[in-house]
Amino acid sequence: MLDPHTTQTAAEDTGPDSGTLKKVGIGAAVIALAVVAFGVATRISATNDLETVAEQASMPTVSVVSPTAAQGGDGLVLPGNVQAYNSAAINARTNGYVRRWLADIGDRVQAGQTLAILDAPEIDQRLAQAKADYQTALANQRLAATTSKRWNAMLAQDAVSQQEADEKAGDLAAKTALANAALASVRELNALHGFTRLSAPFSGVVTSRSAQVGALVVAGNAASQPLFTVSDVHRMRIYVRVPQVYSSQIHAGMKASLSLPEFAGREFEASLTRSANSVDAQSGAMLVELQADNSDGALKPGAFAHVRFAIEGTSGGLRLPGSTILAAEDGPSVALVGSDGKVTLRRVTIARDEGRTVLVSVGLKPGDKVIDSPPDSIRTGDRVRVAAPETKGGKNG
């Protein structure tokens, strides 16, 4: 028969050791921590990769160009704005409805020619009433004059007193003043009635018409569109802004030539008539006016022209593609890229606009990296990535 004590001791010897169990638990915990740490690290790495990709995606890729030195020169060429020698917006001076319009856009009109006729029945009625009031005042004046004359004759015979004769003379003066006031009202309403016929202030061409038959016209409305615009185009005015660096060489009487896109190979002669003699603080340029003969009607109001001045010293400056220029309220500017990829907006002065290229006199230096076709939303401090230049044979690969 087995001893119970012996059997219990044997069972304890064959059971798991407590130290072994502790080691197994610690190992499992380490493995679990390692798995968790690996998952966290993987997630952090993925997050960083996503942030990097997002940052790269939000950073626009731009192409840059460097300004080149302008060689040679054929004078100073600047953009100009062509305007009519005289231009008048025709508005109504009285309220009414358009009955007829007698001229349309493109028609040549003479000074005083009727352009439109308005219906103003209330003016007609007021004029009729004013004429009636004037006739009444005129009748009272004549009666007062006859009475005063009579009383003066009786005063000479001592039939009436001096006081009574003076009263009749005063009544005549009052009636005369009333008649004059009524006549002034008639003349005023006659003038208003005359405004129902809109006429050309000078000879020229009708360049706009908004008058429509039956339309109500309200006088004195500054926001309303003019019924007609008449432009005198026998001569044209051309306005040009000359950069300050060339302003000292511009003077009245000098000749210039105009070229327009619609007349390839043709040049128009113009002469400089006046200058503002003041440099605008925003644009850094001086406004000048030229005049050109337009007997053949080739020049049109509002047209764009290239104006060439035959002056020296126009070979300096740096040339850029016209697509690099940013137009702003404070003047033209360009977007430069630094070595750190940050953008800086810099104002420039355009000495000559050559169409596809522009000549910049102030604001750039050789070696600057200028963004080509920059977006309008670009601002100083933005970060961009510069695209790799393409080879002559195309992209690599």
Image: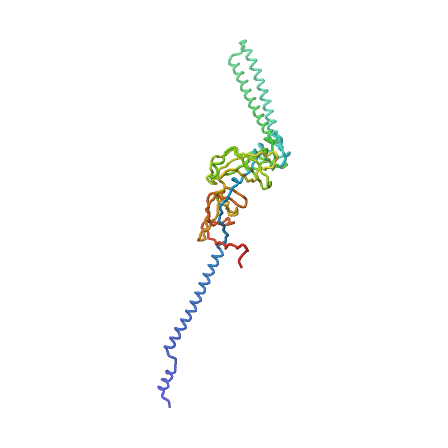
Where 95 falls versus 67 (above or below)? above
Q: Position of residue 364 (x, y in %)?
A: 46, 46
Nearer to the camera, 264 or 381: 264
Q: Is residue 71 visible?
A: yes
List the single residue furthest toward the left: 5
Where 180 falls versus 161 (above or below)? below
Q: Is residue 9 left or right of residue 97?
A: left
Q: Is residue 208 visible?
A: no
Nearer to the camera, 37 or 63: 63
Residue beneath the point at 37% across and 85% down: 10
Which corner quadrant holds the C terminus? bottom right
Nearer to the camera, 137 or 345: 345
Q: How many marks?
A: 0
List the single residue furthest toward the front: 72
* Color style of the picture: rainbow
Where 150 falls versus 5 (above or below)? above
Q: Position of residue 392 (x, y in %)?
A: 54, 54
Q: Is residue 126 left or right of residue 247?
A: right
